Amino acid sequence: MQKPENQSGNIKATGIVAQPVSVTRKMAASLPGLRELAVSKGLKMHHLGAGYPHPEVTDPRKFLTHKTRYYQHLADKEGINDAEQLPEYLRESYSYTDTLGPKSVREKFGQVYGADWNVKMDPDLLVPTVGATGGISLLCSLFERSGEPLAFITDAPTYAGFLARASLGHQTKIYSVEMDAEGPLIASLRSQIEQARADGRFVPFYYTVPDGHNPAGFSFSQARRESILAVMREYGLLVVEDAPYIYINYAEEAERPESFLSMAPKQSVHLFTGSKIGFPGPRVGFLYSEAVMDISGGETASLRDLVVTEASSDILFQNPEALYGLEALLHDENMVLRASLWPVAEDKLAVYRENRQIMLDGFERELGKYPDKFTWTHPGAGFFTVFSFQDDSVVCDEGFVSDLASNYGIVVIPMYPFYPDDAKSRNPKAGLNELRLSFCFSESQGEARRNDLKESVQAFCDAVKKLSDIY
């Protein structure tokens, strides 16, 4: 009898390469066991790792009541009095819709969001996405389609979701750029673009999170943003602006830097998500760009047209009910279109601003006298601060964070997995002295939330002092 070619009996999948599991996924998977171990030692678990929206600001009950009232408002506008007559919004919400979704949602979102960021947004250039991560996937897929060697430029460190998606392209290589306290180093940005081109790769864009950078825990300065745009224009690249925390901003209005969207809509791709300002579950997002691309055959095409074609092959039919939910959020209690989304954001900011201050005050009180031992970023936006050990003997690897969880009850995320491979090649110790700490999430609310976060910060400070031989 002839032996089967596949001795293992498993299904063949030639060409598929297993991708590494992100450290956040590993921590989530190991957390139940670590929690059980910590509890067996009489320890309380302290959540300083999860970058989730806080349950205190994502309770959907008030929103659902508002959405129901808005839907009735739409029916009233149609003049529907017959209970048997189907309102247009309801028909559209549960029918097929095209790749761009209901036009009214794009029109109203463009009007309100554009007013906030001083841009006259064309609703036909707004492409619905499955959160901002869906926009990342569309862009990567669009440029991968040519089959030519690609280079995506990004920060060192960068968002784990971008690393995971960009790494799927077999013809793609990530070229990363070190940062200082204002953003990417401009000389390094130029150098990496030139090196990628010298390596025979097409470079379509530079990807970043300029406001509340995940995971770096700071926002780019206005001057650095202007320098980045100058480089993009010089080399003919797009800047992809991932903006999940653009409204989760702690700076005074006059001190907030401009978005790339408002500075250069023809040179940028803006990725919006409703996950932080609204609700994470519906996964509502938009991609917006006014860029025009040179394509094969000496022709040109709008980036919007190229992305819509790509989106049609990915998610042909958007979820219209989720999009109409965003439309409801764009209206106030009187069903009047809002002039701005900042009042909506303020409901969230009240919690995050308070949490941020609790963490920073605790660090300053407990660790401020040891600047030779510890430093941390002061986030102008977002959910995170990066905590750094100045002592090289402290190595923040997976074993270190597992020990923090099992021996001290403290859940944190190490920074080294957020550094692309080329950054680790340049510096094998990249991120190994850093932790990403989040102040956004806890399992409690109100005064209990405040007390729990204070307790968590105190427990963390006590632990790092002990690990640094200060006790």
Image (spheres, rainbow, N blue to C red):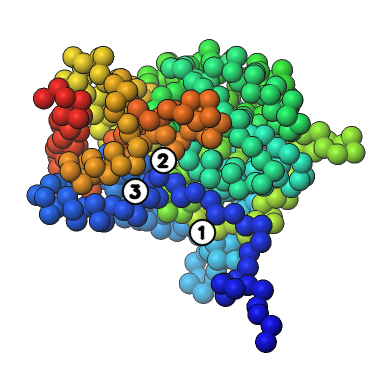
Label placed on residue 237: none
| Residue 381 on image: x %, y % | 39, 28
Q: Secondary structure at mark 1?
A: helix
Please state which of the two labelled residues, at mark 2 or mark 1, is closer to the viewer: 2
Residue 285 located left or right of residue 455? right
| Quarter the C terminus occupies | top left
Residue placed most toward the observer, 343 or 447: 447
| Viewer can see residue 305 | no
Q: On the image, which quarter does residue 440 sit in?
A: top left
**Marks 3/2: CA–CA distance:** 26 Å
Secondary structure of the residue carrying numbered label 3: helix
| Dot 2 amino acid type | Ile
What amino acid type should be assigned to the residue bearing mark 3?
Answer: Met
Q: Which residue is mark 2?
A: 277
**Residue 355 in the image, given as x and y percentages of width and height:** 25, 33
CA–CA distance in space, label 2 to label 1: 18 Å
Q: Nearer the viewer, mark 3 or mark 2?
A: 3
Kindly identify which residue carries mark 3: 27
Q: Where residue 274 sits in the image (x, y, percent)?
A: 46, 44
Asked whether 8 or 357 is in front, the reply is 8
**406 on left or right of 266:** left
Q: Say whether disc 2 or disc 1 marks the residue closer to the N-terminus.
A: 2
Residue 112 location in percent, x, y? 52, 36
Q: Residue at label 1? A: 321
Earlier-in-chain disc, 3 versus 2 = 3
Q: Residues within 10 Å of mark 3 (few under 14, many from 20)?
A: many
Inspect this view and state whether residue 271 appears: yes
